[in-house]
Image (tube, coloured by chain):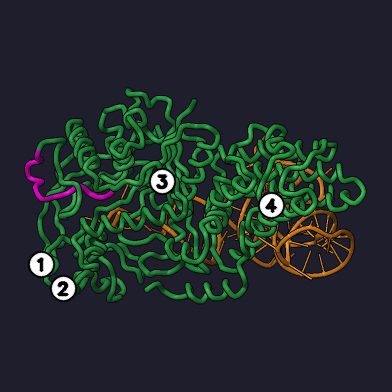
Amino acid sequence: MTRTLITSAIPYINGIKHLGNLIGSQLPADLYARYLRARGQEVLFLCATDEHGTPAELAAAKAGKPVAEFCAEMHGVQAEIAKGFRLSFDHFGRSSSPQNHALTQHFAGRLADAGLISEVSEKQVFSHTDNRFLPDRYIEGTCPNCGYDKARGDQCENCTKQLDPTDLIEPRSAISGSTDLEVRETKHLYLRQSELRGQLSDWIESKHDWPILTTSIAKKWLNDGDGLQDRGITRDLDWGVPVKRGDAPWPGMEGKVFYVWFDAPIEYIACAAEAVEEGVISDWERWWRVDKGASDVRYVQFMGKDNVPFHTLSFPATILGSGEPWKLVDYIKSFNYLNYDGGQFSTSQGRGVFMDQALEILPPDYWRWWLLSHAPETSDAEFTWEAFQQDVNKDLADVLGNFVSRITKFCRSKFGEAVPEGEYGPQEEALIADLQVRLIAYQAHMDAIDIRKAASELRAIWVAGNEYLQSAAPWTAFKTDPDRAAAITRMALNLIPFYAGLSAPFIPDAAQAMATGMHTDLIWPEDAASALTTLPAGHVFTVPDVLFAKISDEQREGWAERFSGVRT
RNA sequence: GGCGGAGUAGCUCAGUUGGUUAGAGCAGCGGAAUCAUAAUCCGCGUGUCAGGGGUUCGAAUCCCUCCUCCGCUACCA
């Protein structure tokens, strides 16, 4: 049996993520994990918080808390929200874990031994007032090109000219506004990615089935300009993984930490080690070391397009460069962006709907269904309240929810809350044949992680039940041929556990409610014919509560208003 | 500027080994049914496939050109 390792890009610690972040990695990863588990595969689904870097330190300072404490709290908050969305991580770790410290230092040591680390002395801007080195972006000043007075040290947002911090006129700290800056010499480690360019290029070129979005971004970085550039992997910060060469000190690098993008992907591995400590799994190397049992693992990553360079190049460079048999990713599913009502979702500007707010106003299934059925797979997608209301009401309340409602209530009123007798006839056989074809198509789309197509097929499966009921019309048959009506009712009732099983990856709560109402467990159908005999005559059930209350126009208008501005 | 993605019905989107009258869902219009959350089902689409040019017996699909939107551009993560 194949085993699948699934990782979602790890969300940054500095705040609560918005719906665009959710659909960009965690939610699709969860869908796939749930699907594979339902199909009986062994799955390890990992995610974590990404806790290092300047923004984390600044967010902690703003909150008036020590950074370690801040991160611990925010990790708890994000973990709770993830539960709220039913994200089924086997472990939700932290990039600040001791396991990640050890592994990050281990990789750095291996890379150094392989001659893939160089020490580079460079000049960085230091702010006396802030008592820290400032990343280019955290330096503001007047653009020498256009005169814009809020140009950043990496680029002027007004004229888009790329800048060097030293180009700025009257530079100041974006954190404190202080102009007490000094250019200081500092030494950093660089990962010599350029040495691995050929290897990485061959590897990327061999991935013909990856999304074009993934490979095109990777190839661009491999071939742009002088090709893949070496990358600094250390920073002058307090919070992070201290620079060490394996277990040994690294002379000259005292007081420095590894760059967040160096240690963050390594957390994918460390997270499995954390999971062992948590007792979730017994052996993490069997998922990560090809020489220790991981040769039959298929590893799939999910991420937004902004993360692709790090996952296609930097992290593989780390793994390949180590010379050790770590598992390389087999498939990278990448996503475009979800826009919000004509503009971008923005964490920094507080624009859009954030994960905690979404859960305040509606159950997770509403969000899961809409976001997944509109996943930005081929291009950017757009969230509007009108579309959200319309689609959710139609798909979930009218098509699926009402189907469950109408047949269970019909049965209760005519035959009581137990499945009636009756032989299936040609109409039932036709339905079964149709559903079998659709089941195969649905599984094929899920296997290919073709999310919108899978959602569309699932919806068609729901519609098939309504079509069947409408044409078989048990309410009419009941008047002249109660036995026939009983058979139709039994067929239709059997669709509920069938739908529950197939829908669970998308809408786990509603699926469970359907199964519970029918007094069955959630199961993935082997084939339509056998699945639709799950409930035998005489099987007792309970009419479930309304599965999906509709979103009213008043609610929609209220939310559109509430979320029209900026989160404070 | 460079690179990449996108531009198809009012809306959201399918649709490339080039091939019959370009499809789906939603919205809209008409009808059926009355079991159900006024929920369902059936029927109805003459769209400059962004514009222009080219290759071809044949182009949404290949080539050239051009316009628009978005992203990335390596020290935010």
Residue A303 in the magenta stretch? The answer is no
**Secondary structure of residue under mark 3:** strand
Q: CA distance from mark 1 to mark 4?
A: 66 Å
Report the residue marked by disc 1: A128
- Residue A352: x, y in percent? 46, 67
**Secondary structure of residue under mark 2:** loop
Q: Are marks 3 and 4 in contact (CB under 8 Å)?
A: no
Badge number at residue A8: 3
Q: Chain of mark 2?
A: A
Looking at the image, which residue is at 17% across and 44% down? A189
Report the residue marked by disc 4: A404
Q: CA distance from mark 3 to mark 2?
A: 38 Å
Q: CA distance from mark 3 to mark 4?
A: 34 Å
Looking at the image, which residue is at 44% across and 45% down? A88
Q: Are marks 1 and 3 in contact (CB under 8 Å)?
A: no
Specify the segment rendered in magenta: A249-261
Q: Drawn colour of chain A? A: green
Number of residues whose C-alpha sits closer than 10 Å to that of mark 2, classed few (under 14), some (14–19) or many (20 or more): some
Q: Which chain is orange?
A: B
Of callouts 4 and 2, the N-terminal one: 2
Q: Are marks 1 and 4 in contact (CB under 8 Å)?
A: no
